[in-house]
Image (tube, helix red, strand yellow):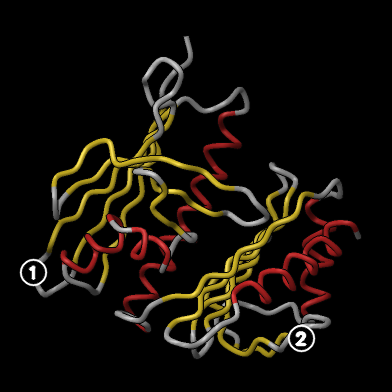
């Protein structure tokens, strides 16, 4: 029988428990740090770009403290759940704990590591949102493309097409072909992830070799954005990158 495994993460946020609760319990709140969410026929639908969506619902709720999300499987049991726990601390900060629990696939270690890296990025977004953009509404742009190319080659091509190979903490001006420049500070960086914090939000670029895809998640706070036009432009850019 498959073993059910847990993946746990924790962050301390410069926000009140009420602010953090809104960020994890409403579609508008989830959108400011995760991916676009909306209420659809009683479920919450998450948009990961390129027509790739996932739906779930709140299975358990303790208002202000705890919520568990999941989508029941054929037997009525959710194959995967996400539990968020909110705890206020002295001094005005709040601790958020996340536990993702479920049956990972045959290659569970790679899947586990992939989910872990993804949550590290998204939770970092939440930390930085409260530091720099708290209270502002978000306009999301998400796009992704599958690729048959090796992840290392896609990554090198990605940074080359952005016009820089920056280090963490470096101030940069990236120049993606056919798109407006990106100016800001590198706030996330490893061998398959590049994150830029700009004056008005975040740009995230990820090469996922395990799932053979490249993605971008972009967040614009408190400024007007033509989401449809930007999404189409970045989707085209990623598809060209993925194809080499």
Return the residue found at the far right. Answer: 244
Image check: 240 left or right of 123? right
Residue 16 sits in quarter: bottom left
Of the pair 12 and 28, the residue shown nearer to us: 28
Return the residue found at the far top. Answer: 1
**Residue 41 percent location from the top left of the image:** 39, 44
Image check: 171 left or right of 234? left
Q: Residue at x 51, y 43 (%)?
A: 54
Q: Nearer the viewer, mark 2 or mark 1?
A: 2
Q: Residue at x 47, y 25 (%)?
A: 103
**Residue 80 percent location from the top left of the image:** 42, 32
**Residue 171 percent location from the top left of the image:** 60, 90
Which mark, residue 241? none
| Residue located beneath label 1 in the image | 90
Figure check: 69 above or below 178: above
Image check: 188 left or right of 179? left
| Residue located beneath label 2 in the image | 175
Q: Residue at x 41, y 28 (%)?
A: 5
Of the pair 8 and 76, the residue shown nearer to us: 76
Q: CA distance from mark 2 to mark 1?
A: 44 Å
Of the pair 199 and 106, the residue shown nearer to us: 199
Nearest to N terminus: mark 2 or mark 1:
1
Position of the C terminus, as image quadrant, is bottom right
Residue 71 sits in quarter: top left
- Where disc 1 sits, the SS reads loop
């Amino acid at each position: 029988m498959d073993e059910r495994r847990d993946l746990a993460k924790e962050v301390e946020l410069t926000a009140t428990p009420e602010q953090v609760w809104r960020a994890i319990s409403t579609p508008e709140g989830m959108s400011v740090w995760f991916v676009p969410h909306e209420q659809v026929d009683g479920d919450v639908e998450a948009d990961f770009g390129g027509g790739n969506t996932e739906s779930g619902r709140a299975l358990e709720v303790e208002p202000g403290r705890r919520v568990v999300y999941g989508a029941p499987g054929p037997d009525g049991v959710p194959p995967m759940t996400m539990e968020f726990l909110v705890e206020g601390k002295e001094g005005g900060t709040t601790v958020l704990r996340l536990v993702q629990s479920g049956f990972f696939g045959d290659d569970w270690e790679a899947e586990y590591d992939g989910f872990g890296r993804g949550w590290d990025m998204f939770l970092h977004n939440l930390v930085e949102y409260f530091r720099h953009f708290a209270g502002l509404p978000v306009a999301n742009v998400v796009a992704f493309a599958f690729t048959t190319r090796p992840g290392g080659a896609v990554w090198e091509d990605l940074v080359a097409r952005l016009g820089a190979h920056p280090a963490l903490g470096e101030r940069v001006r990236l120049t993606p072909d056919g798109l407006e420049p990106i100016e800001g500070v590198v706030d996330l960086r490893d061998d398959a992830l590049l994150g830029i914090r700009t004056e008005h939000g975040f740009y995230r670029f990820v090469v996922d070799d395990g799932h053979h895809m490249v993605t971008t998640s972009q967040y614009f706070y408190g400024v007007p954005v033509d989401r449809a036009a930007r999404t189409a432009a970045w989707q085209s850019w990623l598809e060209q990158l993925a194809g080499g």
